[in-house]
Amino acid sequence: MSHIDYASSAFGFEPQVPRRPKPAWLPCPKPGEILAVIGPSGAGKSLALAALAGPGRREISRLRSEDLATPVLDLFDPGRPSEEVLRTLARVGLADGRLWGMDAGGLSAGECRRLELALAIRGAKPGTLLIADEFDAHLDSVTARALAQNLRRIAARAQLRVAASTHRPEVLPQLAPDYLFEIDNGKARQLPAPTPADLGDEIEIVPATVRDYDAFAHWHYLGPGRPGPTSEVWLARHHGRAVGIAMFGYPHLLLAARATALPEFAPARIRSDGAAGLNASVRLLQRVVVDPRFRGIGVSARLITHGLRHVGVPWVECIAQMGAFSEFLTGAGFERVCDMPPPRAARRLTEFCRMHGISATALLDSAARATLLAYLPQDAGRQLQRLLNRLVQSRIETGHGCLRGKPDADHEPLLRRALARLSAHPAYFLWTQKESP
């Protein structure tokens, strides 16, 4: 006897074919608009969203088990331009080089939801209908609110039609839907749209010290190590908890990219006139790091903008690899001037490897590197070691000033990161203080 036969005989009911309930009607939002649906579990929210039709309809789908064992970047179509993929990840708050090579299963719940959003909007054209059913499931309140605000920003900027459901009313001010419907017992009724609220307005920005960076260093793609010398540090706090940091410091003395944007501070002028004028007129934006839960809602731009108001110089430079894929610098008023070539030390090492048939990746492993140094003819081995030392020194001068003058420091982690970025082309950004009217 089957289970259903047993239950039928015990309780005296006849097995019936379940009738599919009729979905509640919902309007399709216009490009750039959000329709939000609330209601208790089982009320018919998912059914109504499933019945909603629109151009290029897409859904935010949960990661599958096989996806969790796949590196994040490998989940995207290999035929798509890599720059487009990285910009999509940055748009959803995943502008984090540490995560891109990780298996998706290593991400936090909030990062998984952001990745699912990125996969859903990749290559989406304006006017595409995006279904976000229970987009905030299994998230803490702050992460859910940040994700809701991120979804609102994406809808507006990409001109997507978004239809979202949630059982959490606290996310509605950040989601800021144009239409709000409540579904109960399969019926929908329209409610007044909530008053929009920006999670960033709950953040205060206060002066900080270089020591405060230590709590954020592990989130930066360059890894641990403080930049230097630093002039100003600003901390973003959400209800007393540090959630972001921006660091300003003194500029690099000899920077070729500066010759075009600020010819009065070109390397040749610095060599002849000294650095006093440069240090009095120019600052360098060294680091901007935000807690992953608060990414994608403009915290970086708020930090930078606040710092620029107080920096007291007419120009601020930034050399950023991530700036090419994220909008946090241009959103704060920076202009992208040019792409920077690899530093001279990197170019010379690359040329040495080419001449000797050495793969740069073979240098990443310290044991393999030691074997290679022993295998090469003595003069070539010494030359390679000098080039490696110069590469490390170059990285210290341009991003890890805290290691300057410390010959006994362990430079191996820094060398590996420098070798991994041997062909990197960061962009040179410049902010210019506007004259008062």
Image (cartoon, rainbow, N blue to C red):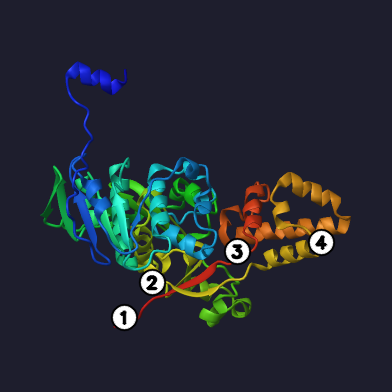
Q: Which residue is mark 1?
A: 436
- Spatial CA distance of label 4 from label 1 is 57 Å
Q: Badge 2, how many Cα within 10 Å: few under 14, some, many 20+?
A: some
> Is the Cβ of the residue at disc 4 closer than 8 Å to that at disc 1?
no
**Toward the viewer: 357 or 66?**
66
- Looking at the picture, which amino acid does disc 1 mark? Ser
Can you tell which of label 2 and label 3 is closer to the viewer?
A: 3
Q: Are marks 2 and 4 in contact (CB under 8 Å)?
A: no
Residue at numbered disc 4: 356
Q: Which residue was labeled with disc 3?
A: 424
**Which of the labelled discs sits on residue 253, or is there none?**
none
For the residues marked 4 and 3, what is the alpha-carbon distance in whole angstroms?
21 Å
Say whether marks 4 and 3 touch (CB < 8 Å). Answer: no
Q: Is residue 286 among what the camera can see?
A: no
Earlier along the polypeptide chain: callout 2 or callout 4? 2
What residue lies at 40% left-to-right and 67% top-to-bottom? 311
In the rendered image, the vertical position of residue 241 relative to residue 179, given as above or below: above
Q: Nearer the viewer, mark 3 or mark 1?
A: 3
Above or below, 279 relative to 272: above
Mark in the foreground, 2 or 1: 2
Q: Quadrant of residue 274?
A: bottom right
Mark 2–mark 4 distance (CA, rounded to whole Å): 45 Å
Q: Position of residue 306 (x, y in %)?
A: 34, 63
Q: Secondary structure at mark 4?
A: loop
Percent position of residue 354, x then y: 77, 64
Which part of the image, by quadrant, shows the C terminus? bottom left
Q: Which of the marked residues, 4 or 3, is nearer the chain's N terminus?
A: 4
